[in-house]
Image (cartoon, rainbow, N blue to C red):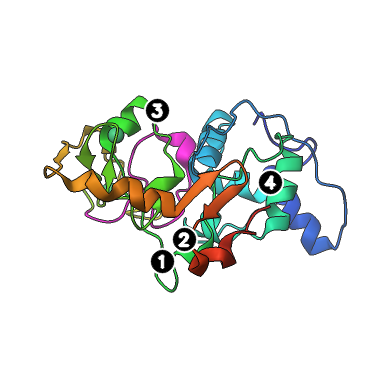
Amino acid sequence: MAGRPRGRPARQSARAEAEEGVVSEPRTLAIRVLPQPGESLDSWLEALARRSWTSLSALLDALGLPTEERTHYLLTGLPPEMFQRLKKQLNLRVRVLEQSAVPPALFGRRAPHWRFCPQCLNEGQGRFPTRWWLPWTFACTKHQVLLHRHCPSCHAEPRGFLPRSVHLHPPGRCMRRTGLRTVCGADLGELPALALPTGTLCCRPRISSTLSPSTNGWTPTEPSQKSTSAYHR
Ligand SMILES: [Zn+2]
Ligand SMILES: [Zn+2]
């Protein structure tokens, strides 16, 4: 594994040290996949796991990140200090991850849901933007189509649960588990485009300007959302 800490298997690294009470400086790992502008944190970590030929959960373990069942925890549940450590471990530039996660206050008590554009998945080799997790994102403005929400094969939300053995499957596939060692595997990039009713996107610019990602993270423009402005800085 290219990004694995030297001298110790990934699954025994950060977590084992924590259990043993070892306090040490976070290792700097060599990476070959950089996050794209606006890319979702789970998308980038999955791409990194694929390139490192390891499962996503093993990579998260090696980085000392939680391996929660729900995927959206990576976007909404990581405390700022964990982000800082991640940037140090992966030797990333300042603010390069600010648009990869979402303030949990945006969702209130509702769990985030992932939607996707098949064409974008194909063009991006399975990688996708953070905005696909946002509650108000329902269409792809690039391809002028509605986003899909469910896998056509297992009829479930493809990223509801943390994908595991991503290195064993091509990108852009539904990684929903169907058994102990099996996943759905449907090619989400093959789904037909969902036609967008005429005029559907007319109000989107106004919605986007209410809360938009910036180089400093997510910047609210309305007083009611000021509580999220200090997130991930
Ligand atoms: Zn698209
Ligand atoms: Zn599926």
Q: Is mark 4 within 8 Å of ligand 2?
A: no
The answer for how far apart the CA atoms under marks 1 and 2 are is 9 Å
| Label 1–label 2 contact, CB within 8 A | yes
Q: Is residue 156 magenta?
A: yes
Q: Amino acid at mark 1?
A: Ala
The answer for how far apart the CA atoms under marks 3 and 2 are is 23 Å
Percent of width and height locating residue 34:
60, 30
Residue wearing tag 3: 125
Q: Which of 169/192 is in front?
A: 192
Percent of width and height locating residue 99:
55, 44
Q: Nearer the viewer, mark 1 or mark 3?
A: 1
Whereabouts is ligand 1, in terms of quadrant? top left
Of pointers 4 and 3, the one earlier in the residue sequence? 4
Of pointers 3 and 2, the one earlier in the residue sequence? 2
Mark 1, secondary structure of its residue: loop
Q: Amino acid at mark 2?
A: Arg
Is residue 49 at all visible to an observer of this figure? yes
Question: Most prominent secondary structure in the magenta stretch?
Answer: loop
Q: Amino acid at mark 4?
A: Ala
What residue range appears in magenta? 155-175
**Residue 111, numbered label:** 1
Of pointers 1 and 2, the one earlier in the residue sequence? 2
Q: Amino acid at mark 3?
A: Gln
| Label 4–label 3 contact, CB within 8 A | no
Residue wearing tag 2: 70
Residue 193 higher or lower than 80, as above or below: above
Q: Nearer the viewer, mark 1 or mark 2?
A: 1
How packed is label 4: few (under 14 Cα within 10 Å), some, or many (20 or more)?
A: many
**Residue 183, numbered label:** none
